[in-house]
Amino acid sequence: MASDVNELTVNYEEDGVVTTKELDKMILSKGTWTTIIFKYQDWNRQKKEYGPDKFTIRRYQKRDGDYRQQSKFNISSAEQAEKIIKALQTWIK
């Protein structure tokens, strides 16, 4: 468990292989409830290479000094990300 928001990551290693590789992250909100958007890639075992960029928004709650993931929303493709951006830009104008 991470006690500092900057330590939170989506990196995941299995059998010595980083199967989820974090490329970047942006902290959207800090505090007892923290929201972070991550850019990452998943390892394709068959092709032995990383797949396309993906994005995930994660919500963490700090409890007893450690952050615990409470929810997540995975954005599965750049196309879906562009649709989300377009919708938000329409609403925010």
Image (cartoon, rainbow, N blue to C red):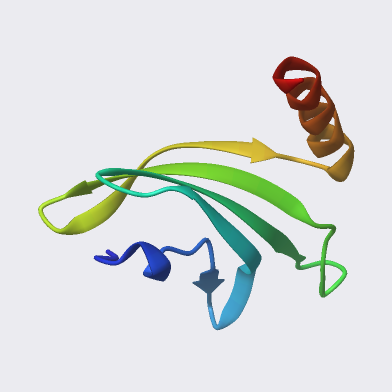
Residue furthest left in the image? 64
- The quadrant of the picture occupied by the C terminus is top right
Residue furthest front in the image? 93
Q: Position of residue 75 (x, y in %)?
A: 71, 39
Q: Residue at x 41, y 68 (%)?
A: 6
Q: Where is residue 64 in the image (x, y as percent from the top left)?
A: 10, 53
Q: Position of residue 15 (x, y in %)?
A: 53, 78
Residue 3, image quadrant: bottom left
User: In screen coordinates, is 2 left or right of 91?
Assistant: left
Q: How many marks?
A: 0
Q: Nearer the viewer, residue 29 or 67?
A: 29
User: In screen coordinates, is 25 left or right of 89?
Assistant: left
- Up-down relation of residue 47 to residue 65 (above or below): below
- The quadrant of the picture occupied by the N terminus is bottom left
Residue furthest top in the image? 91
Q: Where is residue 62 in the image (x, y as percent from the top left)?
A: 23, 49
Q: Which residue is drawn at 82% across and 33% down?
A: 80
Q: Nearer the viewer, residue 20 or 59?
A: 59
- Up-down relation of residue 91 to residue 40 (above or below): above
Q: Residue at x 82, y 42 (%)?
A: 77
Residue 79, image quadrant: top right
Q: Which residue is drawn at 83% across and 66% down?
A: 46
